[in-house]
Amino acid sequence: MTTPVLELRNLTVDIPTRHGTLRPVDDVSWSIDAGEILGVVGESGAGKSMTGNAVIGLLDPPAHISGGEVLLEGERIDNVSPAQMRRIRGKRIGMVFQDPLTSLNPLLTIGDQLSETILRHLDVTKSEADARAVRGLDEVGIPSAKNRMGAYPHEFSGGMRQRVVIALALCAEPTLLIADEPTTALDVSVQAQITALLKRLCRERGMAAMLVTHDMGVIAETADRVAVMYAGRLAEIGPVSQIVGQPRHPYTDGLMASTPAASAGKARLRQIPGAMPRLGKLPTGCAFHPRCPKVQDKCRVDPGPKVGIADDRAACWFPIEKAEDVA
Ligand SMILES: Nc1ncnc2c1ncn2[C@@H]1O[C@H](COP(=O)(O)OP(=O)(O)O)[C@@H](O)[C@H]1O
Ligand SMILES: [Mg+2]
């Protein structure tokens, strides 16, 4: 058995507040192998970003990891010093966020930003770093990369800027990429290009990726496996074909049915009634039960069964059986 690139074991994040402790990430376990893209989906507020930020040690206090472990290539990284974590970020974990401007320094040319990052993390000369920076820009599809090295972030379009951010995230050759809504801020026409780019780069480099998005279309095109989150918990995890085509958790089913891209060719779009509960007001039992078309008494009392690391199954007492029609 090979060691996964990223493994979460019962990861739990707490936010202490005056009104009690909120738990945006509750006992989440999964792993991502080299070359694999795990899509993480769920409505806004599901805990997707909190999970990603916990992995890279960038939770905003007072939010903190209160339980479980994060392992990068088999080593725990949830308990390392801030200095060690800074070295891991950038070198072993690349990051791409929704807004490319947050990742770029407006006062530095993109060439300087890339070569500085390369010099910080790799043992190369300045001229080798510059050469690698040009190659990186070229690889992500920046036209005439060499001539653009001296340009500043504001001189690029949104889509080109996100390409620069991807080049920056990958220039130190990380084994793991965490991309949080990388295409959400971009024009629809550019989204597909960026998605395809991320997929190609993961394949070519054998990199593991955690791709956070609320866009099921992006997931269907990109992910190998998909983790579905609801109210901080893992609702279901499995191969993309199963999640999109044969969902077992009624929440996953509702999410798919409400997405044009995922439900193409199927019945009309339908919305999940109601909204995701606020963290301070989580329902008893399964957090999804007030919105669930299949709710039964047990669901109001008992949280769903746990989804194990290796199990492709749903945290639901009454999962949808194959070929069953719940519409
Ligand atoms: N500083 C904070 N204080 C209290 N709640 C927070 C804070 N930051 C985020 N949350 C809550 O944590 C939950 C998870 O947020 P997030 O991970 O950003 O969701 P997602 O990325 O899936 O949209 C949400 O309910 C959000 O309201
Ligand atoms: Mg988010």
Image (tube, rainbow, N blue to C red):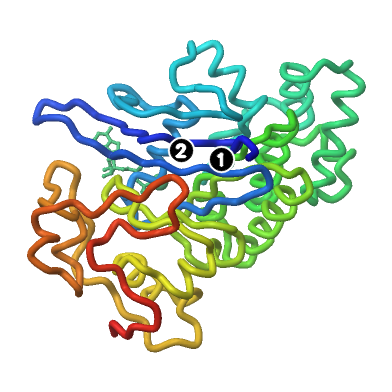
Q: Quadrant of ligand 1?
A: top left
Q: Position of residue 210 (x, y in %)?
A: 54, 45
Look at 74% across and 54% down and name the residue there: 200
In this rendered view, identify the residue nearer to me: 157 or 305.
305
Report the amino acid beneath label 2: Gly
Residue 320: where, in percent of width, then height?
Answer: 32, 73
Secondary structure at numbered mark 2: helix
Between residue 161 and residue 327, name the one nearer to us: 327
Q: How many marks?
A: 2
Q: Amino acid at mark 1?
A: Ile
Ligand 1 within 8 Å, label 2 CB: yes
Instruction: Answer whether labels 2 and 1 touch (C-beta < 8 Å).
Output: yes
Q: Which residue is mark 1?
A: 178
Q: Residue at x 54, y 51 (%)?
A: 38
Whole-angstrom CA distance, mark 2 to mark 1, is: 7 Å
* Residue 17 falls in image quadrant: top left
Residue 118 picture quarter: top right
Q: Position of residue 170 (x, y in %)?
A: 71, 36
- Residue under label 2, please give it: 52
Q: Could you tell whether 269 is left or right of 113 in the image?
A: left
